[in-house]
Structures are given as structure tokens and as C-alpha cells.
Image (cartoon, grey):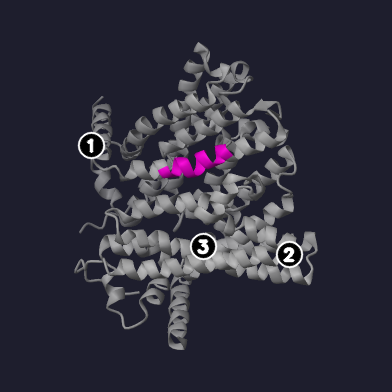
Amino acid sequence: MWKELKFAWYAISMNLKNSAELRTSFLMSVVGMALNNIAFIAIWCVFAKVVGNIGGWTVMDVVAMQGITALNFGVVFSLLNGVEKISLYVGSGSFDRFILSPKNLLSRVLVSSLGISAIGDALFGVICLGVYITFVHLSAINFVFMFMGLITSTCLLFAVMLLVQTVSFYVLDPRTATRGLFELFFTPTLFHGGAFQGWMRFVFTFIIPSLLVGALPVEVVKSVSWPQMGLMAVLSLLWLILAVKLFYRGVKRYESANLVTFGS
Amino acid sequence: MRELRLGRKIIGTLIKNSAYNPQRIILDFFALVARCGILLFLYKCVYNWKGSNINNTSYQVIAWSIFLYFIVSIMRPRDITDAIAQDVKTGSIEMILNKPIHYLSYRFYTTIGTGLYSFFILAPLGFLAMALTLGIPSTMTTHAFVLTCTIVGFLCIALSLIVHALLGVLAFWMEDITPVYWIVDKFVMVLGGSYLPVAFFPPVMYQMAIWSPFGAMQFITHTVYDSWAAKAWNMIGIQLFWTLLFGLTLLIVFRKAKERISVNGG
């Protein structure tokens, strides 16, 4: 386990060094993505101003939701960007090189790539949460809940991404299928959390767990509800276990393409 | 004339190609459901709580406005940026420059040809679904609407293609144009009335949507409102102005860009 973590850290740092070589491009990607995310804040802030309070959500809650979502996305798609590339590896036949590696298969795949622009997402997330903390004056217990919410929601985002990418082992055109499925899951995470009520809240919590990424962590921080936090943790864990199990089951279906590839 | 014939051929071939490869239409369908479908459900919930009118606009009008935004997006004029940037990065532009067609025209035709099949399938289906579930607003049943909406729709795609092609051509000078693309894309998303319909815009934002090229790329979202009949020709004029201005700029910038090409052979 320790060896695997050491290897993962080594791979991530090498990827980072590699990307930082093109400094201007690196900085532009990071800053550009952070600026780009402001659009969602602008949209939902105007929406909240026009429509008023929906489901008890204020403008600051929207900022926190966008912050948590961006931070989760940033962590998963920067450090573990290989998860997003599984469909590409499987589709092109270059997945062989991971299977042949003596390292743990999943960790080897996950750290095979670094998402530069996602670092901008993470940066944007941190700024949003900083703004939220400054204006809302969170107590210590709120902080604890925010931290736990961030961990569970990051796990969930990773799990769903892995599950979606696992579909690559079962379909003929993995890139298109996985992009479509991920779009279906991720787009609602960017919508105003308070607008999801009734059956839509149920669907987007238990069937397509989009609300677990941004909206529910915000509500947990506000309500300081242990049962809600527990439910989030349990759901995230279940999705994670399911994703890892199905990934390894899917790998068994992979047929080598005899494509010789080198590098990370 | 010869270029037009070639263009028709390119578009026709790409439509046939799309018909044999249904993956793209599956992706577009998922995108339409995920973005537009869920958004319309959300607005439905919001209207259920807040009453039948928000900012003097009914749900039916809002829904059609959002739907039109996403229908134009299915044509994917934005994809031209990446196509041009890839040509520049990989060097394959030198092969296309040798073709008996202007490079930019070639890219315009390929982008239109790739998006047209999904548009032809999903637009009528979506229109039918919307009409059956929500009905058609009275503003959409006039002859003037059909005429102006067609012109505006055409200009939306033309302006989007030109602006995004201009972004792609920037790849001659910039290592990575993606951040610039994202920022322009988000301006279009906000001012075009995608997730937030134009009826909800505060006055300053509305003026920005009217007078900026970003808003003009999605003027089609304005066509379903009551005020459209009075503003239609003015807005078409604004769109035409931006289309001509950016078209001219694109030609000048591309001419400058061509001077930077160095053919290495091989």
C-alpha cells in the first residue's frame, strides 16, 4: 500500500513537472479555467436575485456549491486524470501497457495523466469556499462538516467517473458512450441546488447521484445533520465499492490490441 | 461556383458518414437531455412554486427560449476552433491549403456537415416533444416569426462559425488557445440565455446581450418573446454588423497567419 502511494506521488510529481515545462500554456490553462467557472456563479446569482429564495438557498449557498463542485472536480481530474482517459486507452488498445505493469492496475491507470486545467478548477473551488467562509462565518462544527462533505463528495465523483469509464469495456465506441453518460451525471451538479425538490431530488440523489457532489454537502454544512452526513458517506462508499468491483470485472473482458506503446 | 459545388459535396459526404455512425447522435441526444431536459424540469419546479409568471414571462416562453439555444448548439459551430487549432498544431493545415478550396471555407463546410445530421434528427423531434408537452406560444405562430427566426438562426450559426474560427486561427500565435476558447464560450453561454433565459436578465446584462457579439451569437433565444416583433429587424441588423465585422477580421487575421506557415515537407 505504502509503495503504491509512493509510486502514485512520484507519477503525479513527474506529470506536473512535465506540464510545467510549457509555463505560459500551464498558467493560462489554470487561470483560464478559474475565470471560466465564474460564469456559473454569475448565472445562478442572477437567477437567485430574480426568482428569490428557493428551497432555503441563498446566493452564498450557490457560491459554496460551485466551490465544492469545482474543488472535487479539480482534485479528481487533475491528480487522478487517468480515470477520464480509460475509455481512450481501451478504445485505442493502449490499455495493454497498464495490465503488463507490475504496479497495482487501478493506481497505475489513475496517475497516468495530469489534468492541467483542472488545477484551475481546484483553485476556483478554494477561492469560492474562502468567500463563503468569510461571509457566512462558519463555526468549528460547520468546518468539520465541510471537510467531511468534501471528502465524501470527492470520493463519489471519482467513483461515478470510474463507473462511467468502466462502461468502455462493454461497448464498441467507448469515448462517445462515456462522454454522454458523464454529461448526464455531471451537468445537474452545476444547477441551482435549491431547485431540486420532490421526485427530482430523489432521482438525483439515489439513481443519478449528482446532488451528492455539490448541493447536499452544502445543505449538510448548513444543517449540521449527522444522519444526512452519514447517508452521504454510506452512499459514496457504496458507489466506490461498486465502481472498483465493476472496473476489475470489466478488465477481464478487455482483449489485447497488441498495440505497442511506451511512456506514462 | 466550383467552391460551392465542393462545399455541397463535403456537406453531403459528411451527412452520409454521420448516418452510418450513430455515435454522434447518441452523444448529442444525451447532451440535449442532460442540459436542456433537466433544466426545463427545474424551471418547471421553480414556476410551480413561484406562480405562473416570473418577471412577466410564462414558463412556456422560457422553455422555448432555452430549447432554441440548445437546438442551435447541436450544430456545434464551436467545434471549428478545435479543428483549426489541431490542423495548426499537427501541421496538417499544409495539406488542406493545397486543396482547390479556401481553407476557411473547407473548415466551415466540414463543421456544418458534421453537425447537420444530428440537427436534422434532433431538432424536429425536440420541436415535436416541446409542442406536444407545452404547446406553442402565440408569438411563434406568426408569419413574421417564421421569417425572422429563420434569418436569425442562420446568422447565429454564421456568426458563431466566424468567431470560433477566429479563435482557432489564434493557434498560429498562441501555444494553447483553450483558455481563450473557454472564456468566449462562457460569455456566449451567459449572454446567450442558456441556463438563464434573457427574460431574467437585469437591465445592464440585457443591454450587454443585445450589443455584444456574444449575445448576438444566440439571438434566436429572443425570438419567442412578445417584444420580438418590434425589435426583430434591429437585432438582425446588429447580427449582420457583427457577422461582417468578424468576417472581415477573420480574413485579415488568416492572411497574416498564412505568412507564418513554414512547410517542412516530409
- Measure the alpha-carbon separation of dots 2 and 3: 22 Å
Q: For the N terminus of chain B, which image quadrant?
A: top left
Residue B262 to residue A78: above or below: above
Type of amino acid at the residue the image marks with label 3: Leu
In depth, the one of B57 and A224 nearer the eye is A224
The answer to whether residue B238 is visible is yes
In depth, the one of B178 and A120 nearer the eye is A120
Residue B46 % position (x, y): 66, 38
Q: Sort mark 1 into few (<14), some (14-19) or many (20+) by Cα contacts within 10 Å.
A: few
- Mark 3 falls on what kind of element? helix
Type of amino acid at the residue the image marks with label 1: Pro
Look at the image and say whether residue A115 sits in the magenta stretch: no
- The answer to whether marks 3 and 1 mark residues whose Cβ atoms lie closer than 8 Å is no
Residue occupying the far top of the picture: B143
| Type of secondary structure dominating the magenta stretch | helix
Q: Nearer the viewer, mark 3 or mark 1?
A: 3
Q: Residue at x 75, y 63 (%)?
A: A133
- Measure the alpha-carbon separation of dots 3 and 1: 49 Å
Type of amino acid at the residue the image marks with label 2: Val
Q: Residue at x 30, y 58 (%)?
A: A170
Look at the image and say whether residue B36 sits in the magenta stretch: yes
**Residue assigned mark 3:** A157
- Mark 2 falls on what kind of element? loop
Place residue A163 in its image quadrant. Answer: bottom left
Q: Which residues are magenta?
A: B30-41
Q: Is residue A159 left or right of residue A94?
A: right
For marks 2 and 3 on the same chain, the one whose residue lies earlier in the sequence: 3
Residue A248 % position (x, y): 35, 71
